[in-house]
Image (tube, grey):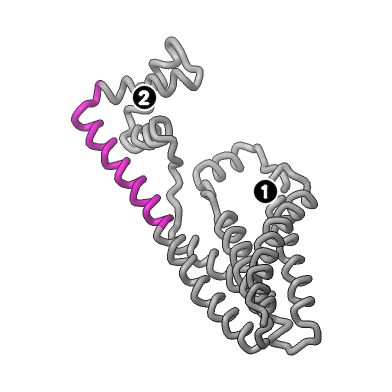
Amino acid sequence: MTDHGHSQQEITARINAPPGRGVLRDVVYGGIDGSVTTFAIVAGVAGAGLSPFIIVALGLANVLADGFSMAAGNYSGTKAELDNIRRIRAIEERHIRMYPDGERREVREILAQKGLSGRVLDEATDAITANHENWINLMVEGEYGLGSVDPHPFKAAMATFVAFLVAGMVPLLPFLLSLERAFAVSACMTMGVFFAIGAFKSRWSLAPWWRSGFETFLIGGAAALIAYLVGSLFHP
């Protein structure tokens, strides 16, 4: 990832329009879960020796139903997070109205912990408390540890669903195309997806791409192996 610019114009534009947390977590979460759960079904049914038709039917049901369920859960969880931020902002707004001196002391303490002192601390406290919105933003971040950029529930849900759908269809493709040795092909393709997702998320990590990919590969492979072993117990 390239470094951002540091001209005054670039700094002003970037700080005034923060990108937020984005949908990386949602994409990785949905992609891994879509691959793992769908291939777990494929492996379990294949281990039980059932027909490819059953594999496709159960796999498609999982991709659609579980994908929607995950998206709905992510939407509800993100919305709950957003509602909590709004609740805390309302609390701080009421406290500022009812206990301005106490809230001002809290601002001073937050700024002091950031290294300000003396006259600079006094002036910074005056500047922050002179703007009602800035005052609340500082309290939300400094007292509760919450960011000032609100999450987006619908965007998070859609990112999860699309990633789940795309990654979850990969284990089913060999069966949909009626390929020979479909299970072996499905296993190789799915393991490739696990590794690719891990390598992809390393772009936002300090870990090398191969280590991140191998870590995700092991997690997905372990889930698939467990499902296959359980399914094999019911093989006639």
- Which element carries disc 1, helix, strand or loop? helix
Residue wearing tag 1: 204
**Which callout, 2 or 1, points at the residue further toward the start of the chain?**
2
Q: Residue furthest front?
A: 236
Residue 63: image quadrant is bottom right
Magenta segment: 77-101
Main SS, magenta region, reads helix
Q: Is residue 44 above or below residue 101?
A: below
Q: Is residue 189 magenta?
A: no
Q: Is residue 184 left or right of residue 48?
A: right
Residue 27: image quadrant is bottom right
Between 59 and 95, the one lying in front of the other is 59
Residue wearing tag 2: 107
Residue 201: x %, y % from top left: 68, 54
The type of residue carrying mark 1 is: Trp
Residue 78: x %, y % from top left: 43, 55
- Image quarter where the C terminus lies is bottom right
